[in-house]
Image: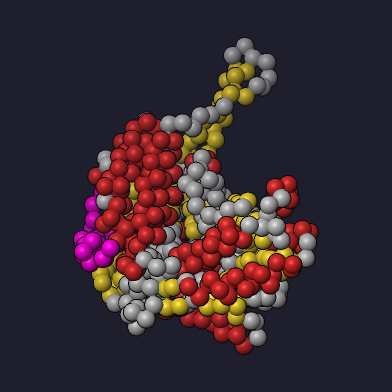
Amino acid sequence: MNLQSQNPSPAAVSDGVFIDNEWRASASGATLDVVAPATGEVFTRIAAGNADDIAAAVAAARRAREADWGQMTATQRGRILTRAAEIVNRCHDQLAALEARDTGKPLSQAQADIAATARYLEFYGGAADKLHGDTIPFLPGHFVTTEYVPFGVTGHIIPWNYPAQMFGRTIAASLAMGNACVLKPAEDACLTPLRLCEILREAGLPAGALNCVPGRGDQAGAALAAHPGVDFLSFTGSPEIGAAVQVAAAQNHVGCTLELGGKSPQILFEDADLDRALPVVMKAITQNAGQTCSAGARLLVQESLLATVTQRLRAEFPGLTAADPESDRDLGPLINPRQLDRVRRFCAQADADGIPLIAEGRIDPGVATGGNWIAPRAYGPVPRDHPLARQEVFGPVLSVMSFADEADAIALANDTEYGLVAGVWSRDGSRAIRVARQILVGQVFVNAYGAGGGIELPFGGMKKSGHGREKGFDALYEFAATRTMVIRHD
Ligand code: ADP
């Protein structure tokens, strides 16, 4: 499929800020260039919002909460989200082409992302009126009940790796609960979130219930995190900025959820089904060019299996190809030159330290020279204290390490500051479950691995990977406070 013939119409995406269901020029009038990662070419512009735009967006959200949006029933809110899901599905090809161009990801991955975005809207649309409080047995002559109360105005700061999906997962859950949202999408890729705002308006979302201020992180992002009119923050991005957002939340005494990445292990025991496991292992490090919080970045292999796995990677990994989004191969370019430089530095250090390069994929010779291209790599055995074993690369670099036995596998899997996702591969079901339950992560797969997959599945971190849960019903509880009512009737 050709991106040009798909007509992603980037020019049709506004370069303004979206407040009260209208596009307006940013307060400063400034804009930022949007660069295609696959070519390095500027192809459109977005607004460079600042603190004034954030203040206007927060005020609009507050008005919406106090007016028609705040008065709607959960069923009415759900119907709007469900209608938005239908519109996203109708616009699927156009949104996917836009996502592929903006992020550089292969077209079929972008298509899967748009389908997932529609699923988020559908799931939370359906869930909106299915969240019930409790009754709690208490003292004689008392009746106690709980209800879930939206916080009010929620601030959402999302990254560039899955713009459409991130929009779906954080905005749909918050709107379903009845909050009014202010979104700051990432400056490196935010065109689909801008279009999705229009789609929600088309679906009937009242003015002010969703506002979007694109712009730089240190301006629009920092202003949103610090705004005293925001009642709750949801952040996905780097641990460093996540810490800053948490400090800002603390200063305003509001809560936040943080999803901050990982160094996720996949554990291959000697009885693993390699024919099932290895394709999944390779996909989990090349999906989105490794720029996935839950990328399967560490492959932990039982010593007795290491030679076989190394041999298989040597045979199969070189087939992995980085190519233009429309060629739709295994992976696209990295998002920007800064990210490319970072990943190259990790590889250069591994090379300088004498870490064996097991195998390298390829870059399609037809790609544009201005793109941020890197071939996927597998290194190993990687020593346990090496940066490749411990730090998040956020690129298509797989670190292969070995372990002796079950206890060693668990220790090694947990030997990282992160705790987002893990995979355990073994034909011994008891062992797989026993091990899986000892890994300090928010999501663990047995004989499977889904890098962040599953709208229905609660997702989030332990340790430096952050706190709070997105996806599934858990996300709804994050965006609401429990109000307990105690009624005395004797
Ligand atoms: P990455 O390094 O992967 O780009 P970041 O954590 O820098 O991840 O970015 C994630 C999101 O946080 C983006 O929307 C970005 O604009 C925003 N951001 C960056 N700096 C700040 C900041 N100081 N305060 C709030 N948000 C920020």
Report if residue 314 lies within the magenta region: no
Residue ID at (40%, 50%): 116
Quadrant of the frame with the N terminus: bottom left
Residue sitting farthest toward the bottom? 352
Q: Position of residue 41 (x, y in %)?
A: 29, 77
Number of numbered tags placed on the structure image: 0
Look at 22% across and 67% down and name the residue there: 4
Image coordinates for residue 458, horizontal then vertical, percent: 54, 46
Q: Which of the two residues, 297 or 225, is positioned nearer the viewer here?
A: 297
Q: Answer above or below: position of 352 versus 108.
A: below
- Given residues 33 and 379, the one toward you in this image is 379
Front-most of 41 and 75?
A: 41
Note whether 367 is above or below 295 in the view shown.
below
Q: Is residue 204 visible?
A: yes
**Residue 208 visible in the shown view:** no
- Nearer to us in this view, 279 or 155: 279
Q: Which residues are magenta?
A: 1-27
- Corner quadrant of residue 295: bottom right
Left/right of residue 101 with respect to residue 268 in the rendered view: left
Q: Residue at x 62, y 24 (%)?
A: 136
Residue 4 magenta:
yes
Asked which quadrant contains residue 157, the reply is bottom left
Quadrant in which the C terminus is drawn: top right
Q: Residue at x 68, y 54 (%)?
A: 426
